[in-house]
Image (tube, grey):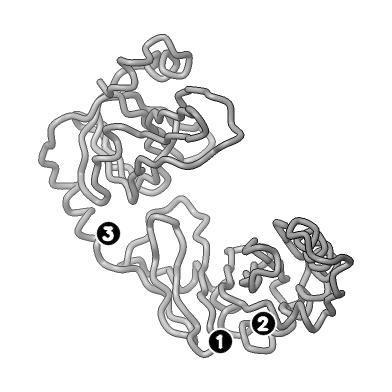
Amino acid sequence: MLSLYREFSGNDVVKTILSFEETEFLFVVADTPKKSVSDDPYAEDKTHIQLMSLPGVALKLMPEGELITGDVDVRYPQLFQTVAGKTLWDPREVAELEPFRVLHARGSHHSHERSKEHYVDIWEILPDVDDTDMEQLLARIDVPVELDSTFGPLVLDRCTNTFEGRAEELGVDISIWYEGEELLLAESTNLKRKFKAPLTVINKVLSAEFLDEAQRFAAAQALRAANRWRHDVALSECNSVPAPELTTNDVYAKLTPVAVEVPQRGNLSVEFDDGYLFGGHPVTVKVRRNGKPASLELDA
């Protein structure tokens, strides 16, 4: 049994997790959590357990269950504890698991009737067992999945479910979000058809002119916020106010496009480095698939 279950046996989250029917299963995840500590000077002291999830790649219920691939959530308990202005995120033993390796556990299994999504909750990590089906699947998963674009290959990152690449001539990272449930493999014959829409956007819409239009839109939309931020900084640093007004051209000159994200449907996102105009906060322009800017997202 995982240590958090033993230490917090009276916790409502723990009791709920352990209330379901027990089963054993094999699973593969694309990523694992890490223990971390952050400064949180204004937070109250608090301790609680939260159910977190890992991106699952494959699942097999024991002893003779079918091999399930694609949309699998592997859930585990995590400790959140704030003491004296510091917050601890601690997944305990789950942090020791390795991605893209066949793992064996005791826990519970849940699935949705209306979708293909499966959930498993880890209660205990068990000794490794050999399983030919899972090992063969791992070998297939190990082959990189790529999409060809005019800017070069986009390679699937299974941790984030995105195809990632770079348009060097434009100076931006480019990515396509994969929103489906099917496990993507290099041997798949329908990849080009499945991602035809976002690839068309990248191949035919993404250009220096596209980025420039988004940058000018961002500069115009962010001008008022930039002057407000400039005034507030001057006040906080005891400088003379009102601070000199910025122009749209000033804001434009500060912004640098760094990434373009293309979902399978809906608006694109163009992310800009703010040149510390907003203290390092992200500046994002949502753009329609025809290349026309639609809105600005500014966390400042």
- Residue in view at x 87 percent, y 74 percent: 245
Residue drawn where x is 67% and y is 82% of the image: 211
User: In the image, is residue 8 above or below residue 83?
Assistant: above
Task: Place residue 75 in its image quadrant.
Answer: top left
- Residue 166: x, y in percent? 47, 79
Rendered location of residue 67, percent (x, y): 27, 42
Gap in Å between the C-alphas at discs 3 and 1? 31 Å
Residue drawn at (21%, 39%), measured in percent from left and top?
103
Report the residue marked by disc 1: 170
Checking the image for residue 141, the label placed there is: 3
State yes or no: discs 3 and 1 in contact (Cβ < 8 Å): no
Closest to the observer: 47 or 149? 47
Give yes or no for contact between labels 1 and 2 (Cβ–Cβ under 8 Å): yes
Quarter occupied by residue 272: bottom right
Q: In front here: 211 or 61?
A: 211
Where 57 falls versus 216 (above or below)? Answer: above
Quarter of the image with the N terminus in it: top left
116 with respect to 273 (left or right): left
Q: Which residue matches tag 2?
A: 211
Q: Does residue 94 appear to the left or right of 219 in the view shown?
A: left
Camera sees residue 112: yes
Q: Is residue 96 above or below residue 150?
A: above
Q: Secondary structure at mark 3?
A: helix
Q: Is there any visible trace of residue 270 in the rendered image?
A: no
Sequence order check: which comes first, mark 1 or mark 2? Answer: 1
For residue 273, above or below residue 113: below
Give coordinates of residue 38: x percent, y percent: 47, 42
